[in-house]
Image (cartoon, grey):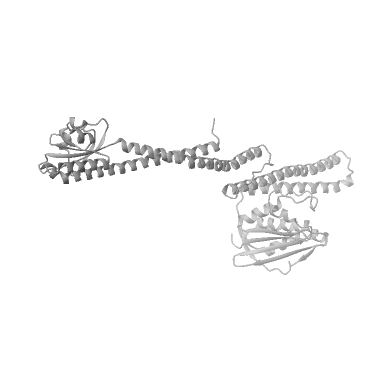
């Protein structure tokens, strides 16, 4: 069974913390052990030096009691065993209490091995050893205390003392580490839960979206990167939900668009073939059939243009032409519609010629769609205004029409594919919602921009900025 992200993150974090503490304790143990070893050897060496400095009186038989007292004091203060041997390893004197009372002790019955005597050097350090005396290893320091190397002083300290100290330190370390560790584990648990909960919610929402349910949203519980991710995810869900709604609406509209003219065409043609429609009426009905065929053609061409633009199959074929001349040509083609709606054209006759290097056919489609929309959505007796300016690098074309306008909340979506405004307000109920999407795609392909401003029941203005060279 696969571990959930929460468990993985929590256990990995806890493991890293635990391992770090253990490694830290190991390092601390090594450092403390080295320090304790150095300190022990330094103390033992000092004892050997002190004994060596006072050995002359002992060797001449003078003040032997004082020398013995010094050795005992050093042994007690340093917590070490101190004894003097001859060159054969025989113990001549010991600083322990038993020797002071009886003149002999447990140490005096042993002889230090000759190989250890021979290894005594200038630094006084002897490797950790039992000296053939002790059951457990000791730190050992030794020094020759006569010019002829006939006598040696040994100072030893039990190795387990450092281990006991390290053991106590370890217990204190782990005991006091438990309290912050407990708080740390609780904090890690809470943090891990907070980090993974939004991800779990996103996973559930994504699974729901795969089933076609776009209703789930991720709660935004923080303003950090996770919160930003949740906000972005919700925005994506909203976009997908809107796109899915548009897609369904588009499929329904296209189905209706195709069905209605095809039914009309089929009905009239059947009427002509079976004689139901009289011969003198055939021309009229064939005109209706022709209009429906053209309507179907526009719908199919729009869908084909959208598919071609989305797939990236088209490539620009820039040529140099007069933008103003192209605009006038399109306006002349719409003269009947303009007169029928009694529209006032403002600013067209005052525009000046502006040359641009671009794909003329695609720019024609852009201007045509914008002019077509302006005529469609202008109120009867309304006004369409034009503005065309240029600077060193770009031309700026603005077309404004009076009419119903676009609600402010819908402005961010007008260039999305399949988007159509409120049908109850729309002057053209059977729009496929592809025109402005195609316009923006073409403008973007020319490295230009298009924007829209509108005020409900007042006006709508589209502004196109195109580079002069492409």
* Residue 302, horizontal then vertical, whole percent: 70, 49
- On the picture, is 424 further left or further right than 196? right
Say which residue appears at 22% left-offset and 43% top-offset.
47
Which residue is depicted at the point 27% across and 43% down? 77
Q: Nearer the viewer, residue 70 or 243?
A: 70
Front-most of residues 443 and 81: 81
Q: Horizontally, is 203 left or right of 126 in the view?
A: right
Is residue 153 or residue 268 the one in the foreground?
153
Q: Is residue 100 visible?
A: yes
Work out whether 50 lies above or below 81. Answer: below
Q: Can see residue 123?
A: no
Q: Is the residue 421 above or below the residue 26 in the image?
A: below
**How many marks overall?**
0
Question: In the image, residue 468 lies at what x, y percent?
Answer: 61, 63
Residue name at image x 85 percent, y 41 percent: 272
- Quadrant occupied by the N terminus: top right
The answer to which image quadrant residue 18 occupies is top left
Q: Quadrant of the C terminus?
A: bottom right
Q: Where on the picture, by quarter, is residue 4?
A: top right
Where residue 185 appears, as percent x and y from the top left, is 51, 40
**Which residue is at the front of the view, 261 or 22?**
22
Whole-percent x and y of residue 204? 63, 38
């Amino acid at each position: 069974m696969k571990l959930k992200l929460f468990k993985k993150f929590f256990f990995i974090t806890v493991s890293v913390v635990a391992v770090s503490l253990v490694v830290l304790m190991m390092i601390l143990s090594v450092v403390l052990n080295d320090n304790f070893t150095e300190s022990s050897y330094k103390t033992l060496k000092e004892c050997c030096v002190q004994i060596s400095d006072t050995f002359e009186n002992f060797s001449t038989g003078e003040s032997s009691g004082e020398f013995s007292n010094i050795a005992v004091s050093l042994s007690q203060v340093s917590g070490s065993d101190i004894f003097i041997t001859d060159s054969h390893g025989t113990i001549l004197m010991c600083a322990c209490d038993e020797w002071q009372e009886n003149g002999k002790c447990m140490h005096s019955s042993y002889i230090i091995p000759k190989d250890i005597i021979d290894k005594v050097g200038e630094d006084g350090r002897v490797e950790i050893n039992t000296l053939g005396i002790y059951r457990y290893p000791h730190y050992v320091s030794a020094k020759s205390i006569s010019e002829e190397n006939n006598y040696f002083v040994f100072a030893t300290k039990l190795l387990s003392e450092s281990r006991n100290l390290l053991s106590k330190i370890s217990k204190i370390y782990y005991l006091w580490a438990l309290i912050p560790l407990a708080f740390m584990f609780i904090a890690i648990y809470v943090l891990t839960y907070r980090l993974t909960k939004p991800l779990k919610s996103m996973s559930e929402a994504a699974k729901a979206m795969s089933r076609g349910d776009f209703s789930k949203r991720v709660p935004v519980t923080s303003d950090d990167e996770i919160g930003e991710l949740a906000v972005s995810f919700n925005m994506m869900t909203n976009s997908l939900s809107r796109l899915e709604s548009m897609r369904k609406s588009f499929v329904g509209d296209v189905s209706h668009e195709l069905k209605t003219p095809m039914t009309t065409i089929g009905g009239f043609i059947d009427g002509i073939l079976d004689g139901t429609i009289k011969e003198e009426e055939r021309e009229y009905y064939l005109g209706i059939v022709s209009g429906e065929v053209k309507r179907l053609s526009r719908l199919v061409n729009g869908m084909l243009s959208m598919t071609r633009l989305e797939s990236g199959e088209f490539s620009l074929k820039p040529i140099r032409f007069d933008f103003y001349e192209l605009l006038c040509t399109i306006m002349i083609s719409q003269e009947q519609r303009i007169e029928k709606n009694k529209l006032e054209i403002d600013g067209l006759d005052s525009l000046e010629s502006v040359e641009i290097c671009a794909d003329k056919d695609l720019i024609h489609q852009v201007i045509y769609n914008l002019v077509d929309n302006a005529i469609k959505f202008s109120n009867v007796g309304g006004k369409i205004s034009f503005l065309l300016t240029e600077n060193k690098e770009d031309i700026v074309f603005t077309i404004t029409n009076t009419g119903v306008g676009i609600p402010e909340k819908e402005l961010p979506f007008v260039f999305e594919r399949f988007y159509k405004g409120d049908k109850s307000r729309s002057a053209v109920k059977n729009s496929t919602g592809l025109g402005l999407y195609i316009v923006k795609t073409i403008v973007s392909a020319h490295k230009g921009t298009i924007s829209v401003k509108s005020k409900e029941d007042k006006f709508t203005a589209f502004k196109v900025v195109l580079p002069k060279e492409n």
